[in-house]
Image (cartoon, coloured by chain):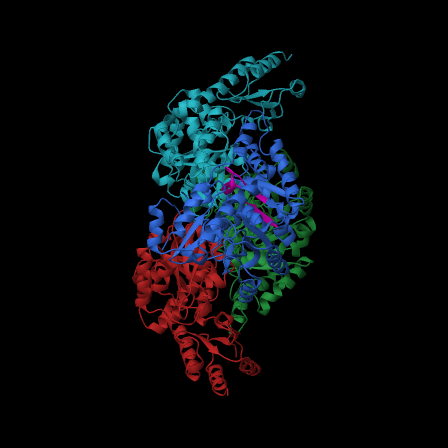
Chain colours: A blue, B cyan, C red, D green
Amino acid sequence: MDFGSDNAAGVHPGVLAALADVAGPAARAYDSDRWSEALDGAFSDLFGTACRVFAVPSGTAANGLSLAALVPPWGGIWCETNAHVEVDEAGAVGFFTHGASLLHVAGRHGKLTVDALREAAARRRGDVHQVQPAALTLTQATESGTVYAPAEVAALGDWAKRHGLGVHMDGARFANAVAHLGCHPGDVTWRAGVDILSFGFIKNGGLSAEAVVAFSADVAQTLPVRRKRAGMMPSKGRFAAAQLLALLTDGRWLSNARAANAGARRIAAAVPVRLLHPCEANELFVRLAPAERAALRARGFDFYDWELDGPEAARFVVRWDQTADAIDALVAALAGLP
Amino acid sequence: MDFGSDNAAGVHPGVLAALADVAGPAARAYDSDRWSEALDGAFSDLFGTACRVFAVPSGTAANGLSLAALVPPWGGIWCETNAHVEVDEAGAVGFFTHGASLLHVAGRHGKLTVDALREAAARRRGDVHQVQPAALTLTQATESGTVYAPAEVAALGDWAKRHGLGVHMDGARFANAVAHLGCHPGDVTWRAGVDILSFGFIKNGGLSAEAVVAFSADVAQTLPVRRKRAGMMPSKGRFAAAQLLALLTDGRWLSNARAANAGARRIAAAVPVRLLHPCEANELFVRLAPAERAALRARGFDFYDWELDGPEAARFVVRWDQTADAIDALVAALAGLP
Amino acid sequence: MDFGSDNAAGVHPGVLAALADVAGPAARAYDSDRWSEALDGAFSDLFGTACRVFAVPSGTAANGLSLAALVPPWGGIWCETNAHVEVDEAGAVGFFTHGASLLHVAGRHGKLTVDALREAAARRRGDVHQVQPAALTLTQATESGTVYAPAEVAALGDWAKRHGLGVHMDGARFANAVAHLGCHPGDVTWRAGVDILSFGFIKNGGLSAEAVVAFSADVAQTLPVRRKRAGMMPSKGRFAAAQLLALLTDGRWLSNARAANAGARRIAAAVPVRLLHPCEANELFVRLAPAERAALRARGFDFYDWELDGPEAARFVVRWDQTADAIDALVAALAGLP
Amino acid sequence: MDFGSDNAAGVHPGVLAALADVAGPAARAYDSDRWSEALDGAFSDLFGTACRVFAVPSGTAANGLSLAALVPPWGGIWCETNAHVEVDEAGAVGFFTHGASLLHVAGRHGKLTVDALREAAARRRGDVHQVQPAALTLTQATESGTVYAPAEVAALGDWAKRHGLGVHMDGARFANAVAHLGCHPGDVTWRAGVDILSFGFIKNGGLSAEAVVAFSADVAQTLPVRRKRAGMMPSKGRFAAAQLLALLTDGRWLSNARAANAGARRIAAAVPVRLLHPCEANELFVRLAPAERAALRARGFDFYDWELDGPEAARFVVRWDQTADAIDALVAALAGLP
């Protein structure tokens, strides 16, 4: 009963079927196949605006390339203190941008606010002796399992634009955020000032492809050669494209995310007073004493201690393919804690 | 009847089956699954020495990471003038190494020789004002479709070691080379002085994973964090590992390559006097006048003009899954040229 | 009456004389002249240990090169939150290291403590998904005008070594620190675990050269080529070397610093209750209301508002060549504030 | 009697006087002093167009920063095979540009031609898999001691512009070239399509400052922060500025160069049949047998063997401050060779 990570999820059968469908010989190489060529259109339809889409092999790659498209090597990138780009990517942003700096701002339940950014920005002089702020990166859903509402993204996007900053969204769990909000995916992206999105699929039923979605030709301009130079332009691009297209088909990306969110909500409802953050997507952060954690693990539940939220914090992630039995068992186990 | 590129090849059924086998949920993430953990052992068995193996998403990535493991940012890398790293990777070596330089040496039929390297090295002063040569990269099979014999690799490896250089092999078509030589894969790698190998699988029946094979712990030391930082450590690593393992199973990597080589040999036998290079792997470089090329294309054959070998050069690549019919047709068409 | 910055200081007459002495023709280029060749010996004598010394054109260059000698591109560098490398160098550390990250720890009066570092280090997992801490950088004297005692440096150095970290000291005002401590310069550097020092001369009577002092051949190993590649190996190296040698001659570096420190102490004594940090070197941080600052400026005093220490903070820097008259005037003006 | 390098030259007395003039205290730091602020105007006057000028500490730095202003990290830079950026800068271009590649074209007597560039460019495909040519760099005077005429630069500049390339001139010996041509400095720079110039002063009477001269605000745009981040913005900028201004004063830059050129011409006249390249600036490349070289050295002449021009080549450089006696002696010695 593994609640450790949605990276442990399985692959959606529709994805496997799509791979088999395109596995035959004589497709054209390097994104010249018809599946790769269909990507821009499919995502443009989804978002309701013209997009340029680049399949990449990981979320770290998506974030690194996206931010490199927005900032120069001497740029600064406003991010939440515990953002994935800061905590979990081994300095990939520095690699892809040739040395840009992450500028930390503490959020509330993982969410940045205009007030906090304004205050942090006021402490910078901005002269030639300093790193030059060039972008804002938001995580949606956040690393605390919360979700920015469209108006929140728009306020941040507006602040960023007024300061000449590009806006990136780390959407490793973008599907979970949209499933929670019930909004149009454009409402929390390009309509709210987001320039480029790391759209996650791997945790949500995919196999090995994430999508970088650029909402303007300008932002996308350097990405083809950046991606090639980073060794991320697949020679058999159809296999990446087919995965993404399969998850867009029939709204699978959204139904998978809804399933995961619903599981998380059921668990959250069992431990309302223990929640460290509102449970809005597919992650729960729960206050559990060491003995309680040990008891749960003894009964076969896997999950992470979460030091970033303090010594009593534990994180549970619900996968799109988590069984009802496992969820029921966890609900019962949590409810049964003294 | 596509002879344009082995990147247009299909995926071996064994690879698809392996992906389906590992597609279920609850595997551990980030190379902690048992398939990823089996990689080192499987390649160590194959090569007859302890290896460290890293799955990466492209040959460009494999070359970039491998060379970054060998050279500092101010390093120089001896390579053949038309090596893939120079001609077809958009400067990826500069990206992964933080600015190292490729040092060109003209080969003979794509193969470097100790004499040519010695002469080029003699023209460098080697003081602090110059790029510092730090590695030699060989391509096996070469970009001209030829294959280094074990003794040739060993001579180059020996020269490199005496000059303090690391040795990398770009083995995008390593399987084709080994199939041609009929030797043990160790004979043209670690036993001949190769420190690290980009072992290609994607052109040869794979889907989206190549292998970086490091033949010592020292050479491998920085690769885990370099790979993570480059966004190439897959969260669902089992899907990359399963592909590689499936192609090692039952010697598929070798039988696929043999099939491709045999097809190329059949075609070569039809046009012996037109060959620009010996046909030793799965590529042919053929002298064809413009009208001849047009005639072949009119009959449905796809292939590339190959300016690097002059205005009359054309390249044909035979895939592992090329049909006998297509090969027969090409043989007949070439034989029928006036 | 400029108390804005010691970068506004003049050049010591002995430096100008030295430049004139070496200005004649036919010296050997690129550090092969006898003045450049004397650097290692002169600093080795000063520090009482074998050093390798590299003249560079700025403190930012000295810090960037020094840290690049200690950390890989994926490394992390512990630093005080308001360290010069973080606040005032436009991301130079990212440039010279190819993307390493600064890891911030809040100090007390600008000084890091082992406790604060230990606590911050405990919040990092250290796995391959994270930036890998590789160095500690200390500023001596600090950006708050305070000075680490030898035992404080030694405790930090010891902690760093036990964690496998290299230790760098940003000594833009190293002379002021040694002048304050009255210790041997080795006591706060190599004897206390410092591996490499940015030894500042420009603020302290120099013209255009700082010194990177490496306390072991290992640490120095990559610096010759890093410095050349960064465009910092001067073709007429004798002019940089002569400056440094001139300031080592007759202990000028130390007497200049003593003069500056003494001036600062006199001013500090006039406003003991307004001091935001102990005044230990040549900088004072003073609480002054806006009207008070305006009054001082109206009387001809130049100084900076210092937002990093809050809205009522002002910084005064005393130069080595500050006149007694200017200091007297400032003492009187401060004493005369209501 | 040192003819090894103009880097061994002395400093013009006017430069030393200027340094003394600005050595007093209380100048403003970081290019806010009035000498630094005068640079743009002085060079704009000289070139007859609005320039932005940045003092840097070496020619390698000037070239690296200039090219970084013109090309992205994935860019290619056309250069002559033996250009200083390729042969003598330890990969600095890779460092400053974050990995751009030098694309070699063999010149004639060190000079590139449109024909050679056109032919080399025709061999590149230009797709996303290749390094993207982004600039052309010319050396004036060349590494072979020859000089591009205004029409030659203009033809190259025109070709570059038609291919969307920026144009850089490595003018380490720009003064010698202008002295030879007798033209307006604008005629071989901005009027001929040059976007940015490394204008050398150190070999020509300066001490430690070269000038990057950008001929448009667009090209200059990123240079302030690039220069700061590279540790090349001097805190006491007046000392760099004063050197440059002193050499512009009274046309010293040009009279120094004329003196050096005249000396070289006198020597060339003594050995017309031995010259490997036309002697147009202050360098001579002379065919000398080993015994002849030994004989000259035995008589006290210093010069370099010049392998780049073959085993019998020697290089003599005449400095601006070379004595008539030394030149006479060399003329006699060369004339006296059997």
Residue A61: x and y, percent?
51, 44
Q: Position of residue C310 (x, y in %)?
A: 50, 73
On the image, the x and y values in percent for residue C254 come to 37, 71
Which is more toward the observer, D260 or B310? Answer: B310
Residue C234 seen from this side: no
Answer above or below: position of D51 versus B215. Answer: below
Foreground: A270 or B93? A270
Q: Is residue D145 left or right of residue C6?
A: right
Locate residue C142 relative to residue D184 in the image: left or right.
Answer: left
Residue B69 left/right relative to C306: left
The image quadrant of residue C108 is bottom left
x and y percent of residue B183 in the render?
38, 21
Q: Image quadrant of residue A287?
A: bottom left
Residue D298 covered by magenta stretch:
no
In magenta, the rendered stretch is A195-212
Q: From this viewpoint, is residue B313 visible?
A: yes
Relative side of C84 to C155, left or right: right
